[in-house]
Structure formats: C-alpha cells, structure tokens
Amino acid sequence: MGVLEIAALLITATALFSYANHRWLRMPTTIGVMLIALVLSLGLLGLTELGFETGALAKRLLESVDFDRTVLEGMLGFLLFAGALHVDIDDLLAEKWVVGTLATVGVVLSTFLVGGATWGISAALGLGLPVVYCLLFGALISPTDPIAVLAIMKGAGAPRSLETKVGGESLFNDGVGVVVFLVLLETLSVGAQPSVSHVLEFFAFEAVGGALFGLAAGWACYRLLMSVDNYQVEILLTLALVMGGYTLAHAIHVSGPIAMVVAGLLIGNRGRRLAMSDTTREHLDTFWELVDEILNAALFVLIGLEVLLVPKTPAHLVAGLLAIPVTLLARLAGVAGTLGVLQRGRGFSWGDTWILTWRGLRGGIPVALALSLPRGDARSTVIALAYAVVVFSIVVQGLTIGRVIRRSVA
C-alpha cells in the first residue's frame, strides 16, 4: 500500500474517530480519538485470538507505516512551530530560569533516575535490558507533551505564570530530550563510551546550533513578511519556514525541534506585531490552529493503533506498569528540585509542583524514538515500557489534570 493510500486511511479514521468523540464521548479530542483507536486495536487482537485474520492484516498495515519518521521528520516540526506561535515571549522571559532549568537539567536528571530504576526493574524481571537501553528509555520518556493539556489548563483557570512554565518547558524539552537520546544512541552504535568533551560538543552543536539556525531562519522569514501584505503569500512563507527549515536543520545536523520553537517564537511575537496586518494575523492563526488540531488528532490515532505492535508478554506488562510510578517520581524529583532552588526567595509552592508533575503528559515522541531503535529484544522491551507510560499519561493524567489544577489553585 502506497503513501497516499495510507494517508487517506489515517485521515479517514481520524475524522470518524473525532466525530464519534465529539458526538458521544465528549472528551478532549486527542484523548478521545486515542481511546477509540486503542479499543479498536484491542478488539482486533481479540478477533485474532478467535482465529480471524483482521488483526494480522491491521498489524501488517501498521508495519508499513514508518511511525518514527512520520512523527520525528514529518509532524514534529509543524506541531512545535504551531505551539510556539502562541507563546508570549515576555511571559516566557519572566519564567526563563524555571523553564530553562526544567527543560535541560530536569530532562538530564530524569534520564538518569528513570534509567537507573529501569535497570533494576529489568534485572528483577529477568529482561536483561542493557544499561544503555535503560538510559535511552529514560531520555525518550523524560520530555513532556504540551498539546493535550494546555487547553485543559486554560479551562481550569490555571494562573498565567503556570501556563507559561508548562508551555515553555514542554516546547523546549522535546528538543533537548531528542538531543540526549541521540547522544546515547551514538554510544550504542559506536560501541564505546564517548568522552565528556565529545558529549558536550555534540550537545552544544545540536542544541545551540539549532537555536541559532531557528533564529536565522525565523528572521529571514520575518523580513519577507514585512515586505508583503497578502495573507495567502504570508501563510505560504511560514509553511516554507517549517518544511524547508526543518529539512535543512536535519541536513546540517542541528536540532530541528529547537530550531522550530525559536522560529515560532520570533514569528509569533515580533512577526505578529510588526510584520502582519489584522487580516493576516486572523488567517494565520486559523491556518496553524487547523494544522495543529489535524496533525495531533492523527498522531493520537496512530498511538492508539500502535498497541498492535507492542510486545505483550507478562514480563513486559509488569515492567510497563512499574515504569509508570518510576517516571512520575523522577518527574516529581526534577520539578521539586528546580522550584525548590529557584523559588526560595519567592516561596516554594507545592501546588505548582504537583501540577507541573501531574501534567507531564507524554505523547508520540517517546513511541517514535523507541521505534527508531535497532531491532532486537531490547528494542521490544523499550517499546513496551514507553507505550505503557504514554497511554497512562494521556488517559489517566490527561483526564484528571483539570481537577488537580482546580484543587491546587483554589
């Protein structure tokens, strides 16, 4: 089956699941469509156990979809740019130390905490997961996904400063998490432990290079936007910025996710104020909100369907269940440590700590990164762990974060 046919099936399924969710379930779109896809997948697995071939056919179809490339090289740039467009740079600068520390030190700390605990779980269950794969799991599961929770936070009346911390950290820690993952993956492929200087050089080139490239690409687009007043052309320019910029960043080996966040912040703030008419702003917002909604719905449908490819042995199930509290505790340690150090003068807030911990949803990036690992038993274990944490965070944390926020800010 070709790319066009697969895309047609995915969009059709996404549209039908979105309709069913809006008509009957009335959950947030991303959560509702993923639950429907997950139930459908489990139903197909049940039919397979009864001797029908439907589950096997669906599994072969999913195997033909390159999930990790679809997410990391296709959807991610659009989603991060669209998210950054609506972040106020002044609010972000006011929380820069909290956002920056959570997105960097928090991700690295969580990587090692989760990696160490995962190694212990693996040894206890006899899974034999190598240390580097345990750290790879820690790196891919540490970044948080802002998409499914920001709308819930606004509806729950979260303070503006807290919204900024949530949105800013999540936009940047995706890029940082991918860079940490790539550093560890290089260790796996080379077969030797790299030096500290090599790791720092690689990290600086990817992360700092991505930020500088995003700033340059965003500035070039901004100058073009200033010279024209036609919303069709201006929307095309932002589309070219994302597609061309992300592809070029990948080609020169700098962080595409970080580049798109920086470019989105520049266009969404300076570009919005100084280079766009009211008509352009209205059409631009509508266009990128639609892109954001459609791609997110399609992504979460894919996450629900991917259960067909997840290993389902008892050991994998137990390991996945144990990985959930491990990930939450590592997140709590990172958030509490960061806020405890940075907010000593302003008063430490356990309310903010619980919200930032519980709203740490995981989305398609962990699953995509897990699927990008070399094939083998270790890869299968990491996929099972990542999928368990992702499903729990989306369903349980996503559906209860509103109540946590209301209780904490009351």
Image (spheres, rainbow, N blue to C red):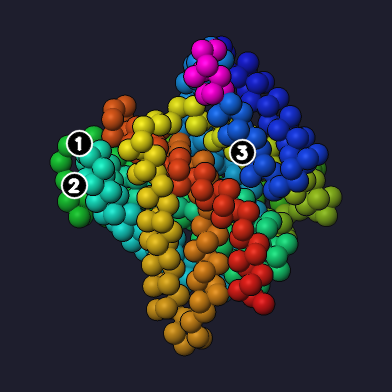
Give the residue drawn at x 45%, y 36%.
368
Which mark identifies residue 386? Answer: none
Give the number of the disc on residue 34. 3
> Residue 49: within the magenta?
yes
Is 315 located above or below residue 265 in the figure?
above
- The stretch in magenta equals 44-52
Specify whether 235 is left or right of 300. right
Q: Residues within 10 Å of mark 1 (few under 14, many from 20)?
A: few
Amino acid type at image mark 1? Val
Q: Mark 2 or mark 3: which comes first in sequence?
A: 3
| Residue labelled with disc 2 | 194
Amino acid, disc 3 = Met
Residue 134 in the image, given as x and y percentages of width and height: 28, 46
Q: Label 1's element?
A: helix
Q: Nearer the viewer, mark 2 or mark 3?
A: 3
Residue type at mark 2 is Pro
Quadrant of image for the N terminus: top right
Circles 1, 3 touching at the beta carbon (< 8 Å) = no
Q: Residue at x 73, y 36 (%)?
A: 18
Identify the residue under disc 1.
190
Locate residue 100: give its quadrant. bottom left
Distance CA(mark 1)–CA(mark 3): 37 Å
**What type of secondary structure mainly makes up the magenta span?**
helix
Task: Give how far across and how far down residue 292 sits, in percent.
Answer: 66, 43
Q: CA distance from mark 2 to mark 1?
A: 9 Å
Q: Tell me: 14 left or right of 121.
A: right
User: Which class describes the residues within 10 Å of circle 2: few (<14), some (14-19), or many (20+)?
Assistant: few
Image-based side of 1 in relation to 28, left or right: left
Question: In the image shown, does 374 or 91 lie closer to the viewer?
Answer: 374
Q: Secondary structure at mark 2?
A: loop
Q: Nearer the viewer, residue 222 or 79?
A: 79
